[in-house]
Image: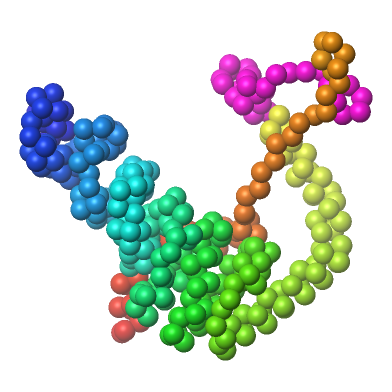
Amino acid sequence: MTNYEKVIEDIHQHVDESMLKTDLAIALFDESTKEEEVKQLFKMYYTKELIDLTLLKECVSFFVRQNQSMVYNDELCKRACQLHNDIPKEIEEYTFYLVVSTNGYERLLGRQLWDKLGIGETEMNILSYSEDLQCRFAISIVQDFVSPKKRLPQLLCLFNSSYPTVRQILINVLSLYTLNYFGLVKREFESRQLEDSDELLMFKEFIISCNNRFNLYRECVELHSEYSMPAVFEICNREASNYMREQAEKVERLGEPSFMDFVTKVHLGRGGGWRKDDGTVHPLQHIQFSVEVPMMISSMTPLESREYSQMFFQDWTKIENKDEK
């Protein structure tokens, strides 16, 4: 009998909760427990409820040591979100320490949790932490260049840090982030009351410089792809359209469910509307959404893209030791 099967047997026999939790921990930390079995233990009601914050932390540490944290990120995040309903402050503090961890896989998990829990909008006092942790937070939270709306609120608070080193690191990491999300960073920055400092003045000047640069770009049509490379621009648009059409045809051919299955098909008439059987004409409805995409990621060379990905998982302890030599 495997340790996973022992847990299942415990559930069927209604054993004492403490014994079930002990067997659950053994099964989770057993290297022979299969991936689908571990995920099942995180899903089943009788077992997931026994994964408290202490056991969750142990799971994270174990999976990181086994290089399996990426496999179970969704399960770990989901359980942390469930615990957040009961112990929000404890989970938020743990998330912060994951974000500033020296281990890249823990930092990745921490940023995912940060976004899912919306910690950027909470009352967490980022300035209450030490200088070292504030510096690590500034570097880590923007390391993957995503979710600016969820990262900026707490990040911009570091302009009020009492440590000059933190403020200097902040403007360094925020500069590249700004080039990727200029409009959003500019609005967030200008909407906040921040304490005067040399670093704040430097960043204000940087914002003005970027604003002038983007205004010049908009005025210079020679820099627009559809003007400077019309043939290439047309080919890209055509290929994108062909790909979307091929995917739609593939779904229809294979009989797979798609979004179009939920849409009623109508015949369009002139004027951009559609007519019901009784002759009533209705205007077309539309759905739109927006998502922030880092401007510079798509322009990376293959080598830059590889270095960018490797940067996520750097072990900061090894970097520190290398600098000390």
Q: Is 258 covered by the magenta stretch? A: yes
Q: Quadrant of the C terminus?
A: bottom left
Please tell me in which quadrant of the rendered image residue 315 appears: bottom left
Q: Residue furthest top?
A: 277
Q: Residue at x 55, y 87 (%)?
A: 197
Provide the residue span drawn in magenta: 246-274
* Residue 268 horizontal/vertical position (percent): 84, 21
Can the viewer see residue 289 in this picture?
Answer: yes
Q: Residue at x 61, y 58 (%)?
A: 294
Q: Residue furthest right?
A: 270
Q: Quadrant of the N terminus?
A: top left
In the depicted structure, whether residue 245 falls above or below residue 22:
above
Camera-nearest residue between 87 and 139: 87
Can the viewer see residue 66 in this picture?
Answer: no
Q: Residue at x 67, y 22 (%)?
A: 263
* Residue 153 horizontal/vertical position (percent): 52, 65
In the depicted structure, whether residue 139 falls above or below residue 267:
below
In the depicted structure, whether residue 165 falls above or below residue 1:
below
Q: Is residue 225 shown left or right of residue 201?
A: right
Please tell me in which quadrant of the rendered image residue 192 appears: bottom right
Q: Is residue 11 shown left or right of residue 111?
A: left
Q: Residue furthest bottom?
A: 198
* Residue 193 horizontal/vertical position (percent): 58, 76
Q: Is residue 31 shown left or right of residue 185?
A: left
